[in-house]
Image (cartoon, rainbow, N blue to C red):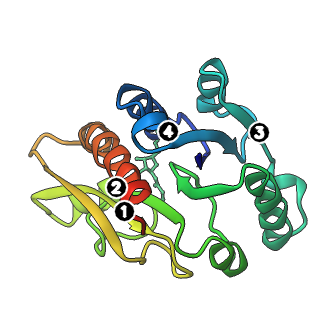
Amino acid sequence: MKNIVILISGGGSNMAAIVKTAKNQNWATTLNARVAAVISNRADAAGLQWAKAQSISTASLDHKAFDSREAFDQALVQQIDAHKPSLVVLAGFMRILTPAFVAHYSGRLINIHPSLLPAFTGLHTHQRAIDAGCKFAGATVHQVTAELDVGPILAQAVVPILDTDTAATLAQRVVSQEHLIYAQAVASLIKYGL
Ligand code: GAR
């Protein structure tokens, strides 16, 4: 069985979309894969409770309890590796990862970013797209490499930016597309490899 470990920091709607798709498409049989664990850097992440209710193993590791980014990432690796993951999925995991962490999961670490990369790496992507006068926004699934939000692109979804959009309304439209492309990208990776 190929184990998928998902890292979250908040609501976890992308994580939930992947778990629901795995159930609906019966990944256990069709892909010999399952979401083995959901791990958060925040104990109060709403997505953790949801995952627990689905009988998925959950854990939290407070980054503030560590002296350095390196120490946190080392502890995180231990938590993740306990599940022997074939794929590690960042789903709204709002931590910058160390090069050692990224190297450890090289070729099996993916992220979703709420912009049409390579445009708008970093934070506040929707407001920046509106401010720049963009007519389209979107989301990108990509492999994680040492440089933030720059790894090879695996999938993208495009949505129009409306004249009436705020960052919040645009984010809503984008995230509903994220749920579709992220679950699809995970399934493809499990099936065909990175
Ligand atoms: C998503 O929009 C995701 O693209 C973004 O955080 C949100 C998490 O939502 N990720 C990043 O900004 C990463 N830099 P969710 O917790 O409901 O899945």
**Residue lying farthest to the top in this orientation:** 53
Q: Residues within 10 Å of mark 4 (few under 14, many from 20)?
A: many
Q: Residues within 10 Å of mark 1 (few under 14, many from 20)?
A: few
Name the disc covering residue 59, or none: 3
**Gap in angstroms between the C-alphas marked 4 and 3:** 14 Å
Mark 4 or mark 2: whose residue is earlier in sequence: 4
Residue located beneath label 4 in the image:
15
Above or below 167: residue 102: below
Task: Give the residue type at disc 2.
Answer: Ser
Residue located beneath label 2 in the image:
188
Contact between marks 4 and 3 (CB within 8 A): the answer is: no
Mark 4 or mark 3: whose residue is earlier in sequence: 4
**Gap in angstroms between the C-alphas marked 1 and 4:** 21 Å
Q: Nearer the viewer, mark 1 or mark 4?
A: 1
Q: Nearer the viewer, mark 3 or mark 1?
A: 1
Residue drawn at the location 30% of the way across and 60% of the way down: 115
Above or below 175: residue 114: below
Task: Give the residue type at disc 3.
Answer: Ala
Contact between marks 2 and 1 (CB within 8 A): the answer is: yes
Residue located beneath label 1 in the image:
192
Above or below 169: residue 68: below
